Amino acid sequence: MRENIIKNISFEFAVRIVKLSQYLREQKKEFVLSKQLIRSGTSVGAMIREAEHAESNSDFKHKMSIAQKEINETIYWLELLKETDYLTDEQFESIINDAIKIIKLITSIIKTTKANMS
């Protein structure tokens, strides 16, 4: 069976998001942004998992597009956490690089799917 890289990376990213959210709540006493972060950051992988069993190419593309929107929102929350000093530059750089990798992969998959549908 072929390894599903985006599925694996998005799951690992979700684990990091959960741990970051725990850190924000326990160490920084931040409760609002961490909830937004966990919602969007974990839904990326969930949508990718849903896309894995899509009913059609159109359904697959739609689910991947939602995953793309969710990772983009996650990037927003991460940037906000950095700019409000909840994350250090080092913490931010570490996780934002993963998020950028995911959005690039999803965008590439969507483009490929769109090209194959034409």
Image: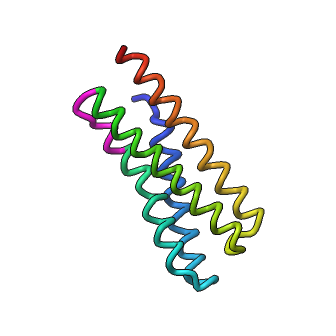
- Residue 70 in percent (x, y) is at 46, 51
Which is nearer the eye, 15 or 106?
A: 106
- Residue drawn at point x = 47 percent, y = 72 percent: 35
Indicate how the structure is coloured in the image.
Answer: rainbow
Above or below 5: residue 13: below
The quarter of the image holding the N terminus is top left
Residue that extends furthest to the top in the rendered view of this protein? 118
- Residue 8 in percent (x, y) is at 49, 44
Q: Left or right of 59: which side holds 22?
A: right
The quarter of the image holding the C terminus is top left
- Residue 52 in percent (x, y) is at 33, 37
Numbered-mark total: 0
- Residue drawn at point x = 40 percent, y = 39 percent: 64
Where are the magenta residues, as a range? Answer: 49-56
Above or below 1: residue 8: below
Above or below 90: residue 117: above
- Residue 72 in percent (x, y) is at 53, 50
- Residue drawn at point x = 28 percent, y = 37 percent: 53
Which is nearer the eye, 100 or 20?
A: 100
Q: Left or right of 95: which side holds 38?
A: left
User: Does the magenta segment cover residue 43?
Assistant: no
Residue that extends furthest to the left in the rendered view of this protein? 55
Q: Left or right of 108: which side holds 84?
A: right
Residue that extends furthest to the right in the rendered view of this protein? 89
- Residue drawn at point x = 28 percent, y = 34 percent: 59
